[in-house]
Structure formats: C-alpha cells, structure tokens
Amino acid sequence: MNQTAELSWRSGQVPVSERFDDPYFSLENGLAETTYVFLDGNDLPARFRDGFHIAELGFGTGLNLLATLKLWRDSGQQGCLHFTSFEAFPMDAEAMLKAQAAFPELADIREELAPHWLSGATAIKTESLSFNLILGDARKTVSNMAQKSDAWFLDGFSPAKNPELWEQSLLAQVAAQTAPKGTAATYTAAGFVRRSLEAGGFTVQRRQGYGRKRHMTVARMPA
C-alpha cells in the first residue's frame, strides 16, 4: 500500500512536505522555476518530436507535467508526448488541484486533467498525452521502464533531506534508461549528484540556478 504525502501549506498556496521539510516548488515562482530548470534545462521545446519521452523522479503536485504539456501544445507540436513519473508519496487529488490553482496560466490543462486525478487514475491517454504515474520506491521501478527517456526531470526533494532519490545506484538506473543524446536537468548542483551522473555516462555541466539557487545541473548522453 502506497503512503500518501503529509502536507502543510505556506502562504496558503505552496504545499510543504512534512516528511521531508521541503516545499514542493519555489516560493518565488514555481512555474518559472519549472520552465527554467526542467524545460530550458532539457532544451525544450526545440527537441520535441512525436513520441518524445520525458521521465521524472518526483511527481509532486503535477506542475511539471502541466507546464510541459502546455509547452508541447503552445509550440505547435504534433503527435503524442510520453511522460512517465515516479512518486513514492503521492498527494491526494484535492491537494494537487489546490497547489495547481496557484498558476492561472495552467488553468485549462488543470481543468482538463482534474477528472483523472479525482478518479485516482495513474495512467492518462489523450490525443496529445500518454502519461504514466509509477507509485512506490523509484529505486525498485526505474529499471523496469519500457521506453528509454529522451529527457529526465530530476525533481526529488533536497538531496540533504531526501537522499534516497539521489543515490548513485538510482542515478545509474536513470543513465541506463536514457536514450542516446538524451538529457537530464535538476535544480541541485550537489557534487555527489554530478559525479553520479558522470559515472553513468552523462556529460555534466553546472549552470546558473533559478532564483536564490546559485547553480543547477544539466547533463547529456553521447549519441
């Protein structure tokens, strides 16, 4: 049985994990952070194509999914976006929708997907989206992913507070499940995370971080 997220709310809109003592997204602007770190960090939408597969460690509020699907559509991309997310402590649907309501730019997609969350769905298939939420410990499930990822969103809680999602063995699985020329991006620039990605075969680069974060990490697999 999967454990659900334990939450408190900061400023009424920002959910904070009681388990990890960490907010789910930037207190400054969660959508801007997602765009900067995960979308720009993986060179999107330039790399989009039909069947492009994004995998994510840490589904959280679903913000990254909504922002990515909006970018997919706004960029005029044809075909279907594939998105797989791994989450050990899922939020309940009402909390997800409350968190997503902080971003009016995503209102249309929020409303479109809301019935799926409210029904408890872990898979969504529409004309433009094929989504799968894999519940449980990612260390036991990432290696079973059927389709290698073209881009990774490494979005677990802080490595200092949630070290399990940043273990070298898990990042080795991430690397093994990355397609040639695939990429990864994360808000953290922790040295052991960069070294683990490099050990998996990624070429790793440190970039200026979003907001108050000095640095972030991007990585790319060779062809």
Image (cartoon, rainbow, N blue to C red):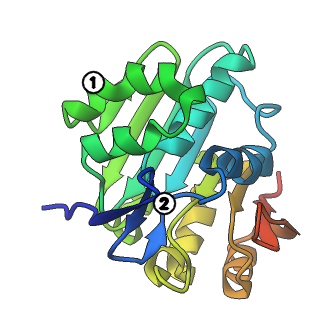
Q: Earlier in the sequence, mark 2 or mark 1?
A: 2
Query: Left or right: where does residue 221 sit relative to residue 70?
Result: right
Determine the residue positioned at 30% across, 55% down. Answer: 90
Q: Residue at x 28, y 62 (%)?
A: 5
Q: Residue 4's quadrant in the figure?
A: bottom left
Q: Position of residue 152 (x, y in %)?
A: 62, 53
Residue at x 73%, y 54% (from the top left corner): 37
In this view, the residue in front, 46 or 142, is: 46
| Residue 200 image point, x, y percent | 68, 73
Q: Indicate the quadrant where residue 132 lies.
A: top left
Name the residue located 12 percent from the left edge and 61 percent from the top edge: 1
Which of labels 2 and 1 is toward the front?
2
Kindly state the secondary structure of the residue where label 1 is placed: helix
Are there few (<14), some (14-19), or many (20+) residues within 10 Å of tag 1? few
What type is the residue that disc 2 sits on?
A: Tyr
- Left or right, residue 114 beside residue 22: left
Tell me, for residue 24, which label it has, or none. 2
Q: Is residue 81 above or below residue 13?
A: above
For this view, does 15 lie left or right of residue 170?
left
Q: Are marks 2 and 1 in contact (CB under 8 Å)?
A: no
Q: Position of residue 56 (x, y in %)?
A: 53, 53
Is 78 above or below relative to 164? above
Q: How packed is label 2: few (under 14 Cα within 10 Å), some, or many (20 or more)?
A: many
Give the residue type that dot 1 points to: Pro
What x and y, as percent, mark residue 13?
45, 50
Q: Which residue is mark 1?
A: 115
The local secondary structure at tag 2 comes to: loop
Above or below, comparing residue 50 to residue 219 in the picture: above
**Can the viewer see residue 146 in this picture?**
no
Q: CA distance from mark 2 to mark 1?
A: 22 Å
Residue 86 falls in which quadrant of the image?
Answer: bottom left
